[in-house]
Structures are given as C-alpha cells and as structure tokens.
Amino acid sequence: DGSACRLRSFIKKNRSGLTKVDELNATPLHHAAEGGQIELMQLIIDDSSCEVLNVMDSSGNTPLHWATKKNQVESVSLLLSRGANPNILNSNMMAPLHMAVQSLHNEIVKILVQHSSTDVNLEGEAGNTPIIVACYKDNPEALTLLVENGGKICKPNKTGCMPIHAAAFSGAKTCMEILLKKGEELGHSAKTHINFTNNGKCSPLHLAVQSGDLEMIKMCIEFGAQIDLKQNEKCTALHFAATQGATEIVKLMMSSYAGEESIIDAVDGNKETLLHRTALFDHYELAEYLISMGADIDSVDIEGRSPLLLATSCASWKIVNLLLSKGANVSLKDHLGRNFLHLTVLQPGGLQHLNEKFLQMEHIKNLVVDEDNEGCTPLHYACRQGVALSVNNLLSLNVSIYSKSRDKKSPLHFAASYGRINTCQRLIRDMKDTRLLNEGDKKGMTPLHLAAQNGHEKVVQFLLKRGALFLCDYKGWTALHHAAFGGYTRTMQIILDTNVKCTDRVDEEGNTALHLAAREGHAKAVRLLLDYGAKILFNKAVASFFHEAIHNRRKDVVSAVILHKRWEEAVVTFSHYSSANKCPLLEMVEYLPDSFKV
C-alpha cells in the first residue's frame, strides 16, 4: 500500500509525463500493459482521459495490442473493462484478436470474443477475418471459440478464399473438421463445402495440392472434393500436382477419380496435359507413371507443342530421352514450324544431351533438313547459337552448308551475324570455293556485312583473310558503312587496314561511311575515318558529313571535328548553291551555338 501511495503521489506530481512518448511513439500505458503492471496501469488510466486507452504507437499498436502480443491476460482484461477499443487495426491491418489468434494466445482470444464490443468478423490484412487467421495458423481452439461466439465460417477474404481454403492450404485437419461440421449445422453439406471456390475458382483441393500435404489431400477427397474441378486457367488440381512432380499425390488422385471422362489427358487453358506439365521441370518419375497409365504422348498444346517439344524447349533432357524411347512423334512442329531438333540446338549443350542411338535413327536424321516457318534448318539454329558440338553433329549427318532460309540466309550468315567465330571456322573448313563467303541474303548482305553490322571484329578479320570481298548490299552499303553506322571503331580499323580504298565508296544516296558515322553521332568513328584520309564528299542532298553532324545536333562529333587537324577542310566544304546546306559555321550558329566554346 505504501508503494502504491508513493506511485500515486509521483503520478500526480508528473501528470504531463503520462502522455509523453518514447522513440516508438509508445506511452507509459503501452509499457505498463506489455509488462503486466496492473497497479500502474490502473493509476495511469485513473489519472488520464479515456483517450490514453487507444493511443497508437508508430506502428499503429494500442496498449491492447502490446498486452496481447506479450500474452498479458490481466492487462487485456483491465484495458477492456476500462473501455479500450478492441477493433483498432494496426499498420499491419491486425486487431488484437487477429494478433492473439495468430500467436496462439487462446486465453486472450477467449476474453476478446466474449467482450461485447469485439467484432469477431473484423477484416484485417487482405480481408482476412480472425477465423481465416485461425485456419492459416492451424489453431483449432481459437477457431472453436470464434465459431461459438458468432464467427462466420463462410466469410471470404479479398481473394475470395474462405476459412475452408485456409485450412486446406495449411494442412489444418482439425480446423477442417470443425468447419465442415459447423457448415452442416448451417445447411452446407460437406461435399458442397469442400468444393467452394475462391475468386480464381480454386477449390480447397487445389490449395491442398499447392502446399503438398498428402494427408490433407486425402481428407479433401474423402469429403467429396471434385478432382476434375477446373479453376480460372482451366487447371485441375492434378495439373498443379503434375507441375510440382508430386508423383504420390497424382497417383492418389488418379486412383480416387470416379468420373466418366478420362482425366489423364485433361487439358488446361493452354491445352496442356499432365504430361506437358511434367515436361516443364523434367519430372521423370511422374512422366514415366503417366505414360504407363496411357497418357497421350503426342497431344499438342495451344502453341502446337507436344510434350517432346515442350520438354526440349525447357531442357528437360531426361523426359526428352524418355519420350523418344517411347516412340514420340518427332515430326510434330510448334506454331513457329520448329521440330524437336530445332529446339534441341537452341539449348546450351544442344545435341550432346540426346542419347546417341537416337541420332542414328533414320527418321530423326531426316529432321536435319526440315525447315521452320522462316525456312531455317536446325543447322541455321546451331550456327546462331554457336554450339560447336551441335554444328559438328549436324554436319556429320550430311546436312548442306548451302541451305538457305526464307530470307536467303545461309548458316554462315547466321554464324557471322551472331559473332560465332568457331562456327564460322568450322563451316568454311568444308567449303570448296568462296561462293558462300560472298553470297548475299535478300537484302544483298553477305556474312561480312552482317559481322560488321554487329561489330564482331574477330569474325570480320577471319572472313577477310578467307577471301570475303568488299561488296555492296542492295542499299549500296559496304561493310565499312555498316560498321560506321554502328560506331564499331575496332571493326572499322580492321576493314581500313585491309582496304583503305573503301573509305570513299558511296551508297545509293551518295553517303560515305563518314556521312553515316557523323549522322549517328559516333565521334571516334568520324575521327578514325578522317585520320585514314577519308574524302569529304557531298551526298545527293549536297551535304557533307559535317552538315549531317550539325543538322542532327551531334555535339560530340562537331567538337571532334573542330579539334581535328582537318578542321579547316571540313569548314570550307560546302556548296554556295545549296540553300539547305550552307557554310558549316553559319549552320553551327543556328543548330549548335555552344560548339563555339570548344
């Protein structure tokens, strides 16, 4: 009693301190409630306004939240008896009841649900009610208390999930039994209840399969879950299980299915079967089981992919070899016209993943000349990827290195375009003449053009050494034009060191490589061409390279020219008769006045 008097006296002398907050924005009452200091709590409440009961800290927690978190039963009782609001949500959208249920503080749950002001169906984060939280946390004691005190067992959250979904996902078997029993009392048969769907049309069985709880799946099936029920994307629970490679779950559902239509080849919204789903992640054991049960190994999805094509595109090599051994149709193509060999060479390692005996089969050998929708063979693909082993394997099958795609590209065009130097060397090794080196595609571009266009200097150097000529494409561009357009100075230097005379070749618009480099703003490329003595010529619009740089406001190029030893030559090269391309100095005043500061 003496200490209580002293405490009361201290509080009276320091009333202003009762409303002070710490770094968490918490009041003395928060701390007293958390510590279960009942006497101090009473003194604070008695000497303060009722507002102190519901003051929130920086996380939105009231003293009631603090007491609940620390399982301080007496603190909770006192706060409620003195008028604390039990329905305040903190910044995590949790009321004290949500918190108590989640923390398994069931004595506090009991006190809260029996308090007249408590909303037992209050929606928290994502619209979850305390009952949904109880099911997610597998807290059957709290669930019973909530149900007995007005909790709604069929109230969904924002995703449409009901308590039954939460119980199924969490493997909360006792909670599931409580819900189904209460549901029957409310007029919902267990079979109806167990097939309730959320906003995505997922049933409790779908969610049980997602979590992989075999016992919960058995329970759902025993209560009448529809195994062939499809959600929004037309997936059954079996599709979910097949994607996970959950063989035992698939076996359980297959053996439990009593529907009239076959389910083993059921398709989802993409027309993928269970076998397609196993192919995604190389679930070999499950694929073997499905095939043994009669699954269609050649069913095609919405993109024209059979399980073999899908497995190949996903590098699921165990299943690829399994399907080949089971006689899968290798002639099937996807919607881009690609057979399984096209897709194989697109993968790292390519053909080395296939059992050698398959590559010796005549019907698979025949695929090497098969073309996709663009006219490309598997060799074109292998050359693009630069997989040396795949290229060698395909060439050993007598595929022609002269085959052309629909846009008239040979395998060498592809290898050069993607900078595959080893592949270029391998292809040229089998050439009897230089025809392939200098053949143009539908744009007139040779392998040298394509290599230069993409700045592959090693390939450019190799092709030049092997006899590639300085030809023009159908726009009149040389390899130097392409390299200059991209600003690839190392590639340009290789070309210039091989044939310096090509600097002044003009395209159909009269542009030299110098014009293109200036127009695109490649200052280093412009400097390089000037150093190599490129002539300052007019194009058909009577513009020099300097006009192109100025008109396109390429400040770096203009600055480089001003500082170059050929500066005066660039300035005086203009036509007095051209109204569009006047003296460069006057043009600079109009377009780039800041250049005069250089």
Image (cartoon, helix red, strand yellow):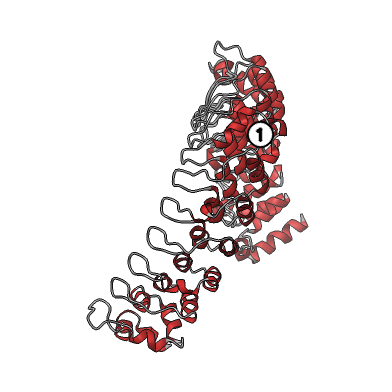
Compared to residue 179, the image places residue 384 above or below, namely below
Across and down, in percent, residue 535 comes to 40, 79
- Quadrant hosting residue 68: top right
- Is there any visible trace of residue 367 in the rendered image? yes
Front-most of residues 516 and 534: 534
- Quadrant hosting residue 188: top right
Q: Which amino acid does label 1 sit on?
A: Lys
Compared to residue 519, the image places residue 202 above or below, namely above
**Quarter of the image with the N terminus in it:** bottom right
Front-most of residues 271 and 467: 467
Q: Which residue is drawn at 65% across and 24% down?
A: 176
Q: Which residue is drawn at 64% across and 63% down?
A: 22
Left or right: 458 as drawn, with respect to 321: left
Front-most of residues 570 and 38: 570
- Is there any visible trace of residue 146 in the rendered image? no
Density class for disc 1 (Cα within 10 Å; few <14, some 14-19, many ≥20) is: some
Front-most of residues 548 and 250: 548
Across and down, in percent, residue 380 comes to 55, 45
Tag 1 secondary structure: helix
Across and down, in percent, residue 226 comes to 57, 18
Compared to residue 385, the image places residue 9 above or below, namely below
Query: Total label count?
Result: 1
Q: Which residue lies furthest to the front in this view?
A: 432
* Residue tagged 1: 110
Left or right: 440 as drawn, with respect to 279: left
**Quarter of the image with the C terminus in it:** bottom left
- Quadrant hosting residue 117: top right
Across and down, in percent, residue 73 comes to 70, 42
